[in-house]
Image (cartoon, rainbow, N blue to C red):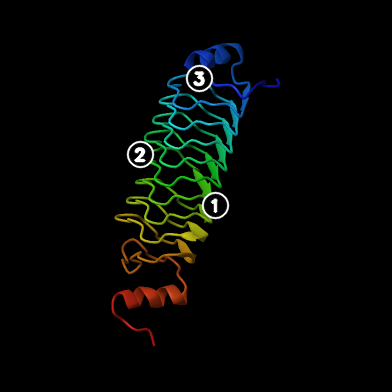
Amino acid sequence: MAPARFHGETIDRARMQAIVAAHPRAARFDECSFEHGDFSRLDMDGFQFDQCAVAGSQWLAASLEETQWSRCRGAGADFTSAQLSDSRFEHCDLNNSHWRRSTLSSVQFLGCKLTGAQLQEAGGWLLSFRDCLLVSADLRGLSFRKSTLCGNDFSEADVAGCDFRDAVFEGGSLRNVQARLARFDGADLRDTDISGLNVMDAKHFRKARISHAQAAAAMAAFGLIVG
C-alpha cells in the first residue's frame, strides 16, 4: 500500500493522532515541522520522514519501529524509551538528542551529527554508525562487539563500559575518549586516531591491534622511547 503523503505541514499531536488512525504504518512526511511537539506513546511504526524539522520534539516511549528518517533536523529531540528497532537515520542533525533506554536493535545511523547525544542505557543488538559525528556523546554501556565502525568521530565521547571486542575501526577517531572499563580485546585500531587512549592497559586491550606508529606514541606517553 502506497503511503499517504504530507508535505510542508506543521504537525502537532492532534494531527498526528488523526494520521495514525487513518493511515497505520503508511504515512510519509516531506518538509514537515514537528518542532517542540509531543508525540509520546503514539504508534508510528513504518512512517517516513524526509527533510523534516523535529528539533525539541518529544517521542517518549513512542513506537517507531521500521521508520525512515532522511535529512531531518532534530537537535535536542527526545527519543527516551522509544521503540526504534530496524529504523534508519541518514544525514540527520541529531545533536544533543536523547535516546536513554530506547530500543535500537538493527538501527542504522549514516552520516548523522550526534554531537552531545545521550545514548546511555540504550538497548538492542546490531546498532550501527557510519560516518557519524559522536563528539562528546554519552555512549556508556553500548555494545559494538564485532562491528565494523567506519569513519566515526568518537572524540571526547564517554564510552565507559562499552564493548568494542573484535570491532574493526576504519578511519575516524577515538581521541580523548573516556574509556573506563571499556573492552577493546581483539579490536583492530590501526586505522583510527587513538590519541589519549591508554592502550597499555593490558586487561582491556588483550590482542588488540595497533600500528607501529601508534605503539611508539603510546610508549612515548609513558616516557619511553622506541629505538
Label whose residue precedes the other's in the sequence (1 or 3): 3
* Residue type highlighted by circle 2: Glu
Instruction: Return the residue nearer the eye: 9 or 198.
Output: 9
Q: Residue at x 39, y 38 (%)?
A: 122
- Secondary structure state at the residue bearing disc 1: loop
- Secondary structure state at the residue bearing disc 3: loop
CA gap, disc 2 to disc 1?
22 Å
Residue 48 left/right relative to 94: right
Residue located farthest toward the right when viewing the structure as drawn: 2
**Residue indicated by mark 3:** 43
Q: Residue at x 39, y 31 (%)?
A: 80
Q: Quadrant of the N terminus?
A: top right
**Residue indicated by mark 1:** 131
Up-down relation of residue 35 to residue 197 (above or below): above
**Residue indicated by mark 2:** 121
Q: Residue at x 49, y 13 (%)?
A: 14
* Residue type highlighted by circle 3: Asp
Residue depth check, mark 2 versus mark 1: number of the one nearer the observer: 1
How dense is the environment of label 2, judged by Cα within 10 Å: few (below 14), some, or many (20 and up)? some
Residue depth check, mark 1 versus mark 3: number of the one nearer the observer: 1
Q: Could you tell me if the residues under marks 3 and 2 are in contact, i.e. CB atoms within 8 Å?
A: no
Q: Position of residue 148 (x, y in %)?
A: 53, 54
Q: Residue at x 51, y 46 (%)?
A: 128
Q: Position of residue 174 (x, y in %)?
A: 42, 59
